[in-house]
Image (tube, rainbow, N blue to C red):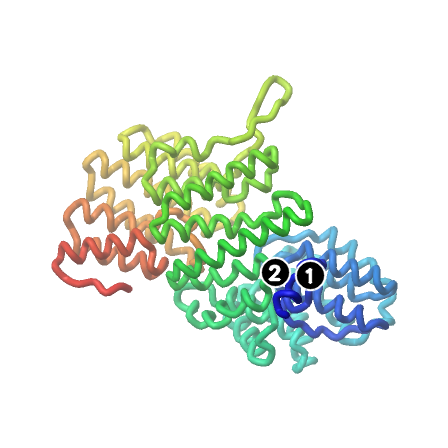
């Protein structure tokens, strides 16, 4: 019976049970409109923004004059935790709320709050003001789970993760099938120190909303923080497959495939020692770029994936290949690349090809210049953490070059400086943005230099930020063996 019901749900647009349980009371003439709205809000909590928007618009079409549908449409244009927002589209949706007298006082409060979100001021100022407005709703309606859940998300977006997580936990305790509660618990505690608190919610979330590919991926945020590689792989395999199935079934743009979970999948394969499977992910990515005819959005994670694979597997002979554009297009004057790499992508190429050149004893100057260009852009944009990361990557390339030249002490000094810069990023989430953790690289160098005691300390420090990372675990074991002591793990 359950399988039959599931098949019926899949045949429809989506079924309520497959995206979680939400009860957001609204003023509607038809019971079906309430059900439609609940389903749309559940999709919104799962960050399935495209489906949520389509569902909200369906609610509006089914009951002309239903005002809250346009609040929902506006909400789909704010991807706060992804640092993406479309204020013009959201404001256009809010203008369709033309009969506020049909709204309850509570509904007007939600609408007023989202108007603040898309009002005057910078993105940061608007998010802080929105969090304050949602806090007022939360206090005014203490038994309203939706007020609590959206307030939780607003706090996380405003960099108040622990407060947001505490509220999400409260909602989760009252309604364990609520998709937003489980989702925001994961985001709130997505770091090595706090991740264990979110493990029960992470294990449940995929079952709460099995049709939402992002819901299938999110548990991996906690699994990765805890070094649970088998679970991380399963989570991202399911998420990637679900996103491809959705995109294919609805004939959507290929850019809507979940390349985020695909990248995480490759990283998890590497941590299992499945290098060949990780390289197969790269081949799939390459084919998608070709099939999309160079759609810019399909290039997401292209440079990061190539950099990660080359550096993690030591495939230095492929350092040029992984950054080559698979698609050329005809322009006036001849053929050219379909893709113009961002500053971040150029930095990733600079790091990877710089490390390859350093190991070969070749000139690293041109590759350091690429990283420096990205660093200067980050400085101009006041992106302090990114600027520090790029500076650390420059020092990593110089350290490997110094080691190759026989200047071992200089190499270790450079890496010590790089580690201080890397540690400016206090929120360690997902595969390392720096690609190669600096403490891990220093540990490997110290092992080569027959200094296992120092190497062991470096590997242990690396594992504090990236638990159970394969290269650091392997290095720690080798250092322990050389010291004649046992190493039981982190």
Image location of residue 147, percent across then percent down: 67, 74
Residue at 53% across, 38% down:
342
| Residue labelled with disc 2 | 211
Name the mark on residue 115: none
Q: From the viewer's perspective, is 453 left or right of 66? A: left
Q: Is residue 212 above or below residue 173?
A: above
Image location of residue 234, percent across then percent down: 46, 58
Q: Are marks 2 and 1 in contact (CB under 8 Å)?
A: yes
| Residue labelled with disc 1 | 14
Taking depth in this image into account, of 361 and 387 the one nearest to the observer is 361
Residue at 71% across, 73% down:
24
Q: Quadrant of the N terminus?
A: bottom right
Task: Specify the quadrant of the image occupied by residue 299.
Answer: top right
Neighbour class for label 1 at 10 Å: few (<14), some, many (≥20)? some
User: Callout 1: helix, strand or loop?
Assistant: loop
Task: Find the distance from the CA under tag 2 to the CA under tag 1.
Answer: 8 Å
Neighbour class for label 2 at 10 Å: few (<14), some, many (≥20)? many
Task: Specify the quadrant of the image occupied by residue 401.
Answer: top left
């Amino acid at each position: 019976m359950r399988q039959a019901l599931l098949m019926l749900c899949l045949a429809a647009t989506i079924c309520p049970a497959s995206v979680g349980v939400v009860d957001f009371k609204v003023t509607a003439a038809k019971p079906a409109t309430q059900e439609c709205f609940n389903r749309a809000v559940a999709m919104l909590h799962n960050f399935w923004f495209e489906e949520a928007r389509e569902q909200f618009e369906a609610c509006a079409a089914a009951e002309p004059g239903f005002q809250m549908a346009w609040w929902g449409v506006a909400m789909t244009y704010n991807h706060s935790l992804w640092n993406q927002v479309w204020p013009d589209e959201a404001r256009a949706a809010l203008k369709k709320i033309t009969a506020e007298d049909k709204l309850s006082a509570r509904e007007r409060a939600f609408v007023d709050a989202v108007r603040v979100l898309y009002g005057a001021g910078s993105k940061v100022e608007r998010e802080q003001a929105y969090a304050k407005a949602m806090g007022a709703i939360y206090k005014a309606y203490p038994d309203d789970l939706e007020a609590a859940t959206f307030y939780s998300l607003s706090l996380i977006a405003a960099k108040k993760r622990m407060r947001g997580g505490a509220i999400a936990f409260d909602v989760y305790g009252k309604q364990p099938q609520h998709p937003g509660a489980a989702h925001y618990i994961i985001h709130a505690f997505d770091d090595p120190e706090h991740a264990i608190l979110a493990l029960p919610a992470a294990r449940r979330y995929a079952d709460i909303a099995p049709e939402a590919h992002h819901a299938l991926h999110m548990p991996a945020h906690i699994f990765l923080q805890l070094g649970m590689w088998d679970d991380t792989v399963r989570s991202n395999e399911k998420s990637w497959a679900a996103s491809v199935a959705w995109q294919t079934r609805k004939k959507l743009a290929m850019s809507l495939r979940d390349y985020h979970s695909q990248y995480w999948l490759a990283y998890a394969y590497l941590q299992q020692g499945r290098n060949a499977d990780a390289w197969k992910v790269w081949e799939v990515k390459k084919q998608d770029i070709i099939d999309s005819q160079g759609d810019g959005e399909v290039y997401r994670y292209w440079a990061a994936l190539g950099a990660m694979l080359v550096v993690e597997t030591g495939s230095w002979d492929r350092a040029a290949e992984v950054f080559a554009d698979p698609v050329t297009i005809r322009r006036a004057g001849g053929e050219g690349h379909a893709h113009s790499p961002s500053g971040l992508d150029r930095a990733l190429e600079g790091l990877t090809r710089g490390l390859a050149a350093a190991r070969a004893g070749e000139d690293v100057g041109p590759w350091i210049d690429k990283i420096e260009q990205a660093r200067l852009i980050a400085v101009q944009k006041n992106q302090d953490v990114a600027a520090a990361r790029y500076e650390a990557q420059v020092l990593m390339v110089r350290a490997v070059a110094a080691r190759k030249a026989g200047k071992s002490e200089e190499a270790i000094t450079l890496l010590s400086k790089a580690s201080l810069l890397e540690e400016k990023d206090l929120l360690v989430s997902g595969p390392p943005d720096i690609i190669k953790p600096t403490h891990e690289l220093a540990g490997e160098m110290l092992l080569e230099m027959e200094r296992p005691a120092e190497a062991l300390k470096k590997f242990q420090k690396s594992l504090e930020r990236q638990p159970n990372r394969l290269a650091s675990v392997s290095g720690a074991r080798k250092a322990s063996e050389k010291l004649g002591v046992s190493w039981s793990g982190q």
